[in-house]
Image (cartoon, rainbow, N blue to C red):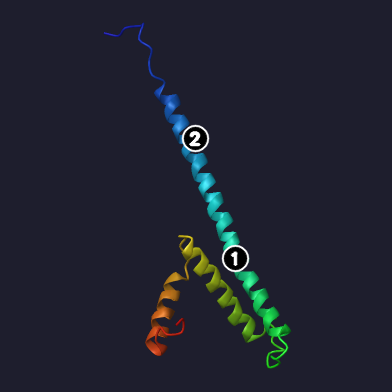
Amino acid sequence: MRKDNIIQFPIKRRMQEIEDQQAFDDMEAEYEIEQFTDECVNIAQLILVMIEDLIHNTEDVHSFDDIDFRNKENQEAKDVFVIVNLFSSMLMRWGGLNHFLHKDLDTMFEKLVKEQGYNDFN
């Protein structure tokens, strides 16, 4: 028996509102992750600029005057490309984001500790 004077709860509309809010929250979280990732990359690239500045503008250092991290044909450019990506990966890990280099970083850390100990920071 159905009574016509009972107002039905608008469950379909409410479910759609919940889905819409979740989609909005997901987009907002994705945007924040994208912004943080961009910041990690930018900081890593800034670190490279600072390294270049130190190497090229330190008075007492002349052994590296010809080093060129921007020429893709040079091995040092290939090495620093990896290093910049390692910096970016490190910053992403600090922020709680996964990066495909994290496993490699962990492996390199273990190898370095095995080879030279963990006294470099003391």
At x 56%, y 77%, the residue is 83
At x 70%, y 91%, the residue is 60
For badge 1, the amino acid type reads Val
In the image shown, does 118 or 18 lie closer to the viewer? 118
Evaluate if marks 2 and 1 touch, with contact meaning CB atoms under 8 Å apart. no
| 96 to the left or right of 57 | left
- Can you say which quadrant of the picture contains the N terminus? top left
In the image shown, does 122 or 16 lie closer to the viewer? 122
In the rendered image, residue 61, in percent from the top left (x then y), is placed at: 69, 90
Residue 113 got which mark? none
For badge 2, the amino acid type reads Asp
Residue 7 figure quarter: top left
In the image shown, does 119 or 5 lie closer to the viewer? 119
Q: Identify the mark nearer the N-term, 2 or 1.
A: 2
In the rendered image, residue 77, in percent from the top left (x then y), is placed at: 64, 81
Q: What secondary structure is marked by label 1?
A: helix
Q: Which residue is mark 1?
A: 41
Question: Can residue 84 be seen at all in this image of the molecule?
Answer: yes
At x 56%, y 72%, the residue is 85
Residue 69 figure quarter: bottom right
Seen from this angle, which residue lies furthest left?
A: 1
Is residue 103 shown above or below 95?
below
In the rendered image, residue 66, in percent from the top left (x then y), is placed at: 72, 89
In front of the other: label 2 or label 1? 1
Is residue 75 shown above or below 93?
below
Q: Which residue is mark 2?
A: 20
Q: How many marks?
A: 2
Q: How many other residues sit within 10 Å of disc 2, few (<14), some (14-19) or many (≥20)?
A: few
Q: How many other residues sit within 10 Å of disc 1, few (<14), some (14-19) or many (≥20)?
A: some
Question: Can residue 70 be seen at all in this image of the molecule?
Answer: no
